[in-house]
Image (spheres, grey):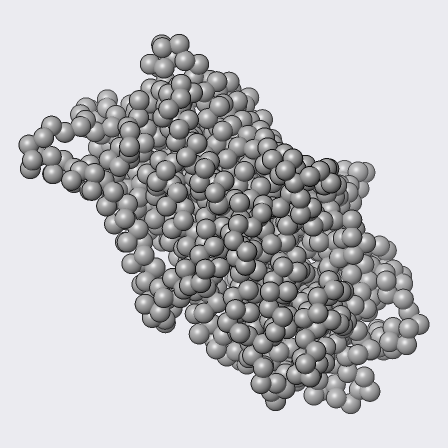
Amino acid sequence: MKRLVGASVPLLAALVAFLFGAIMILALGENPLSGLAAMFDGAFGTGDRIAATAVRAVPLLLVGAGITIAFRANVINIGGEGQIIAGALLSTVVALTIPDTPKIILLPLVILGGLIGGAIWGAIPGVLKAYASVNEILSTIMLNIVAVQLMNYLLRGPMIDPIEVDGSRIPQTERLTDNAALPTLIEGTRLHLGVPIAILAAIIVYIILWRTPLGFRLRAVGHNPDAARAAGISVERNIVKALAMSGALSGLAGVTLVFGSESLRMVTDGGSAGFTGSAGFNGIVAALFGALHPLWTIPSSFLFGALLTGATELQRELQIPNALAISLNGLIVLFVVSSDKVREWLARRLDSSTGQPINEPPSADSPPDQVATTSSGNDPETVA
Amino acid sequence: MSQFFTLSVLTATLATAIKFAVPYLLASLGETIGQRSGVLNLGVDGIMLLGAFGAYYTVLETDSHLLGLAVGLIIGLLMGLLYAVVTVFLHAQQGISGIGIFLFGLGFSDLLFQELVGSVKPVKPLPTLDKLPGVGGIFEPLVDIDILGPLVFDHDLMTYTAFLLVPVVTWLLNKTTFGMNVRAVGENPQAADSLGVSVARTRFIAIMFGCVLAGLAGATLALQLAVFQHNLTNGIGFIAVALVYFGAWQPRWVMAGALLYGLVTATRLRWQSLDIIPQGASDIAAMTPAIITILALVLLASRARGPAALTKPFTRH
Amino acid sequence: MRVTRLLKLMAVLFAISLTAAACGGDDDSASVTTSECGSDLGVEKGDSVTDLSVALVAPSAADDVAFTQSMVDSLTRLGIEPQITDGTFVVEEAAAAIRGYAEDGVNIVIAHGTQYGGSLAEIAPDFPETSFIWGTATDTQGLANVFAYHPEADQGGYVNGYIAAGLAGDIGVVGPVEAGDAVAYVEGFAKGAQANGASAPSIVYTGSFSDVALATTTAQAHADNGVGALTGTSQSAVGAVTVATANDLPWFGTQSNTEAWSTDLTVASQVYHWDVVLKDMIEQIEGGTLGGEAMSLTLENGGLVMEFNGCYDLDSDIRDAAEGVIEDIIAGEISTK
């Protein structure tokens, strides 16, 4: 029963957010039901659209799985956008440097490049936090800005498509070699290898976090740094590791954005959203909705992928700007993070009625852990 | 380079820097109050965007700057109410709920803009002193004074408001009972609570202050630029949060940070227009403020200590 | 819903071309017009040239007074009411919309953005029955069902620059991204300005087609440096226009007629009349040829129109000289590249 309550609260939160969305659509002079129908059609209407939804979910899932690692170690990674870009840049460099390498070798190298690029971009705020006490929220945000400008510089200068130099000078790379493209899984759809890779990555994150000593240390540091230190665990090194791993997964998301795209090239419009589609932020939403658990983040990402593809259809059919989806994402975040207290209250009510002892509410001194522990309701296993 | 180091260019660059600093300053002063009470608000950028749209749209429809600023202020108040309920009463994790506020503001302001306005239509910018209706004539001769004129007198009223708020906020935090309570609940909410200070109420009010200033910062930005568009702030709100750390939670140092930010941006644009920075390097130059901020945080983080209870929800035991 | 509102908006608010064309009807060439000051700005809907269904995917707002609006206005002149997905600055989103229209069986899908080319190369072969019109681009990527279009924007740029040099010695340019028609316009402008005795204009690219705030601050830097005239391109240029207005500087527009932004200070605008090439393409499509050709807008073919603002009191000597320049460009006696 408690489990059921635990799972139903985020769904309730989403429902409230969608209710708000329906009111918005109504206010824009359209029928919310036809809006919902359009969104459903856009996300699941044809096999190809289901594939598009899955592809759209890939970066959300990868970023989201990374977010869960960071959260379990009590660090907040808002640098997904920058880490996606860093990963995409490094993997693109790999593909540009050795384009004639056979696919069987090149594709893994490209993926490795993305992982490393993202890991570097994640490790920097990790080192700054661990060894210079710089708040990681601030440093990740600043590094997002740096990454965008780095991308703009590279795509306008050193990495620009040679044809563009004397042509229209669009800031984009040349079309990358097909040897590095993520292969399509079902002919005629856009379902590519990135989808199973992302799901696999989420499962690996789960295994690392709950089945390995590394995961135990990360969670111990997140749960209670002082106790972890007393037990001989290096808090500093684990903070760096958590952010580097989190960044690596975002970097992998960058790889899927470039090498799973139809245009098979990296292009910038000057901002980060133009390349990432805000996956660095939306991944946080997906992870939260997945109760900060890597496995739950899988269906959660698919749901938000559907929201995004559905929103494109909503704009195409009913001319409702897809900015609606972004604002709904924001509301869902607010409702989900606010629902802890509600859930606690509900659980207490249930417990007192069944006469079972209740868990202590989370301590006030470890905020990220508060989010983490509240997910225990539907966790296969609880923290430490 | 030599064309930069002329008196008139230097003066104009400084004057531009002061103008650029205003939205940062307003937003980070607000954030300072909130953080001193122990509440981090990462949603400043989203609140700024909503305030900016509200003010822009009001001016587009009514032509009244005063009304526009008032709408920005009210939007800040409403968003403050939302954020305060979420963080103070529902104990939501602050870093993340701020992102929720940001995403909501980013999407919702864009949605309203696309539906109500469509494409960017300019409005009247906030008038500088000499262009104020009625009394502008008095200031005209002052603006023409060398150096002092452009630096001190060639600004709009929100610029003066922002800089006047620096001593006001300092006084509020250090000399009033409210300020004492804010600092107390930010440092040790348990102790403050046992002394009869309502932690929830104090934080609630501090958040409201912060969000009102964020809304006003957005409104000022939109009316100084005289336009609105998708993601107009382009991260100003996030930088404003960083400036609070940068300024070690002291209003005067926060102001210094905002001015430095304005100066770096103004200088970069000036150098670009004078061809001192080659076109190809402009993206690299655009990174500098972010890198300076990171470096400053590294240097300052070990020296300044923030409110002890920052980001920690208060539960009575 | 959005489309009808847009059409209403356009009918009411944005005037310019047809009124202008009516005023300039006496001219031998359609490449120069003058708007009647105070006239209603709006493009009149022409007689429909086709029964085929048309969809438009564009990166900025349909009424952006720049790149996207030039296409919407052109379609209006052809009596076409397209389905529109605008503001898709994310390429993958645009690609989804383009594919969606093709799946829906729309006959002609206009991909109005150079950056959509990569996606189009993947999508077009999947829908051999659909005709795609893509720009700005100088070639069709070898695709049989793709038409390409681009403006020789340097021509109008040259004319604008030439006029600007008649009004000021120092001129500021606010460019967006150093790419596509923007860079052609800016370089043509610089060449024209220097041909008429001005010093090399100060050119700053902000790095964004859409960042109005950045365009504003950049233009402010130009104004503080003491320039006597400003120009800029892309939808972000509206920010530069607010600075021109605040500092009373003459402004030169391109893409769409920027009188909608500044009635007083817009001297002249180079306006893209895509209908000139669209009409040709649609005729071919109806005849069964779905693509394979790239077409360009020039002053000569009437695809580029210099629209002078009737409200701006331009010295008649400068105006006459400018018209001479236009004739020389058409005759091939001036190279604008």
For residue C279, say whether it is visible. no
Q: Quadrant of the C terminus of chain B?
A: top left
Q: Residue furthest right?
A: C333
Image height of C329 relative to B38, above or below: below
Q: Is residue C48 left or right of residue B313?
A: right
The residue drawn where x is 78% and y is 49% is A162
- Residue C185 drawn at (x, y percent): 77, 62
Q: Position of residue A283 (x, y in %)?
A: 44, 43
Tell which of C70 and C137 is nearer to you: C137
Which residue lies at the image location 28% right of the left edge and 34% below the top edge? A379
User: Could you tell me residue A201's position as x and y percent?
Assistant: 46, 36
In this view, B298 is above or below C227: above
Q: Nearer the viewer, residue C268 or A17?
A: A17
Quadrant in which the N terminus of chain B is drawn: top right
Question: Going 68% across and 55% down the picture, which residue do you hit?
Answer: C176
Q: Is residue C206 above or below residue B313?
A: below
Residue B29 appears in which quarter of the rendering? top left
In the image: residue A376, left or right of residue B300: left
- Residue B80 at x, y percent in the picture: 34, 46
Judge whether residue A19 can be spotted in this image.
Answer: yes
Q: Residue at x 45, y 20 (%)?
A: A238
Closer to the camera in the image, A32 or B136: A32
Q: Tag count in the figure?
A: 0
Of residue A77 and residue A102, the one placed in the foreground of this image is: A102
